[in-house]
Amino acid sequence: MDSKILYQTFKRLSLTLLTARIQVSSFRQLRNCYFVLVLCASLIPAGAAADDSEISALEALRQGQYVRLNGMFGEYDLSHAGIIWSIDVSKDGKYAVTGSADRAAKLWNLQTRTEVRAFIGHDSDVTSVALSPDASRLLSGSKDGTVRIWDVATGQQLATLEGHEDWVLAVAFSPDGKTAASAGRDKVIFIWDIVSGKAIAQFKGHTGFVSSLEFSTDGSKLLSSSYDQSVRLWDMKTLSPGKIFLSNQGWLLTASFGNNGRSVLASAADNIILEWRIDSGLAEAKYVGHEGWVYSIITVPGSSKFFSASLDGTIRSWRYGESDPDKVLVDAEMPINDAVLAQDRGSFLVASGSKVRIYDVATGKERAADRQGHIGPVRAVVAVAGGKELASAGADGKIIVWEAKSHKELRRFSTEAKPRGGYMALSYSRSGDILAAGTEDGAVLFFDYKNGELEYSTQQHEAAVTDLKYSPDGRYLVSASADHTFALLKVKNGIPVEKSSGVLDYLGKAFFQAFGKHKGRVNSIDISPDSSRIVSGSNDGAIRLWDADREQWLHTYREHRSGVSAVRFYGKRLEVLSGAISGVVRLMNLGEGQKERTFAGHKGAVVAIALGQGHKMYTASVDSSIRVWAIDSGRELQTIDLRGVTDLPQSMFVSDSKLYVGTLRGVILDFDLTSPVKGKAKPSKGRKKR
């Protein structure tokens, strides 16, 4: 298949996954979805990403022209904006480094569980990372075909090591830190001098991708595994090939010196771990038990055991020579791409998905950090109490109230059982001081905002509630859903009228399905300022206008070539702003059925639209940016690049002079909306009226 067609196909798949959550009923289904994504990602050519501009630092966000970062609510977890492929830990156990599909490597302080810095420069996935023995240098290999050396203390790139003709899949430092090795899809192993940055040797012999590298503890030997079903030893003193260990059980994914350097361990594509004696070259044992590929084998000097981490989500303990696992130590319930043992041997650092998780060796349980805020995506934010407080809802099943000025967590709302899949949407009713929350399993919950107690709940939909809004006049609540519908509930003081009168005026499915049900997930809804009209946007590409008072569908508009991901009423007329999965935003006059303006600039799906003073529009996208627009002129005023914090916006809310952005990594960014200082706004592409 042509690489460009393949990339576009994967890009559409990625956007679909980001805008329409996949529901699975078993871990096996989840793992299969993961395998498909990893396979697609492995076929994309290096450099195929749409934009390789340099990533802005957090400090740059504090110097924006129209929008400036003021701070954040919550704390970052150990995560990237993409899958983490590789992890390494410093000898003193204080720091860890990770390499990710987001093209960044990161340094983490394990004692405080905070990000120290990001290393930015690669043009594609960072597939492998290694810290030098003294932790002063970081080595990173990438799908862009380069190996880079970084100064750990400053984050400065010291050298780019070039020579590979394809993806680099493995890098390793020698025990003395003076040399390094790299290998990948071109089947060649390069040996580098760290000081000069020059290649001092090339090892050739493998006939398949080289999947892993490891130096012996004394640095005299280098071990390599390959998709050619072999493990090879290389003599580092003579820079010559040594013994070859052959398998007939498929690709070899990783290899390690085992049994105190007396044997070689390697994992095969049939999920079995193989062991050979180094002195005789003979097969010693097979270790059977994993149900997924093993990408990490962890050996411990002086121990009679070793560990293995697998895409089946488990870490297993094995005794040398015994084919059955000694124990399943960790069940992460997510595929494990890489894992290392902490220096104190008391915990595993596990790369799973886009996060690093820490598991206790003795108990197998995850060590939860004592931290504020959400763990995972913040899907909804809303300002309350006149802007003095902020409420947020996340995929972790938490609703948290924050003090807006100090960014401190004030309280949490709780239910007897957390909703499956967490919360998806929030809306606040001033009339009753009620906070309504929509869940991924289709329910709408009504909380007393002051005390956080659950007042009422209703199973409103058959699938996730994607959006939720109280009408400006406080008469009704509208909920949108992935079940292709949206529903209307009449409320009194923020609570459905069934709560007070015993009669539930439920127009929802009976009304809206009869008058033009969407043919896809309803992603977004909005209500006109006079509460008489409702607009809905769906994955079916349609924008529908409804009369809430007369219970009547009015019109369907199709102005986007892709699904509609966000809609907002604008102004006093029937003007609507709509954002699409394609990244385009359009302004339409629904009363006249005319398209007035196109706002082009985003390179990914628009997930949220917010309106500010001075006829400004704020759009958030999965391209990791927020853009500021002058609605009347169509000009782009500012681009806020969130890749400096390697984050994806999930939700957005404007309150007076504040812009709040809920993110994939669990924090809420607090931006001040300021007046312009210097510079001119740049025109938006395609801003002419049509």
Image (cartoon, helix red, strand yellow):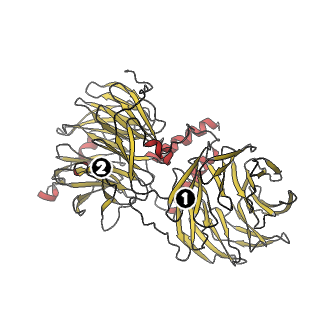
Q: Badge 1: few (under 14), some or many (20 or more) residues near its Cα, within 10 Å?
A: many
Image coords of residue 80 (percent x, y): 52, 52
Instruction: Determine which of the numbered discs, if any, sits on residue 677 in the image.
Output: none
Which quadrant of the figure has residue 588?
top left
Front disc: 2 or 1: 1
Front-lying residue, 474 or 122: 122
Horizontal side of 250 relative to 38 (left or right) equals right
Across the whole image, how many numbered discs are drawn on residues?
Answer: 2
Q: CA distance from mark 2 to mark 1?
A: 31 Å
Residue tagged by mark 1?
A: 108
Q: Quadrant of the N terminus?
A: top right
Q: Which residue is at a point 16% across and 59% down the rendered structure image? A: 499
528 or 100, which is in the foreground?
100
Contact flag, marks 2 and 1 (Cβ < 8 Å): no
Q: Quadrant of the C terminus?
A: top left
Q: Mark on residue 382?
A: 2
- Residue 531 in the image: state x and y as whole percent: 19, 39
Task: Say whether residue 677 is left or right of residue 504.
Answer: right
Numbered disc 2: secondary structure: strand
Is residue 156 visible in this depiction of the protein? yes
In the image: residue 636, left or right of residue 38: left
Q: Which element is circle 1 on?
A: strand
Identity of the residue drawn at 65% across and 63% down: 296
Whichever of labels 2 and 1 marks the residue nearer the N terminus, that label is 1
Tell whether 500 sits left or right of 671: left
Q: Amino acid at mark 1?
A: Trp
Res 401 quadrant in image:
bottom left
Please provide percent x and percent y for residue 636.
41, 30
| Label 2, residues with CA under 10 Å away: few <14, some 14-19, many ≥20 | many
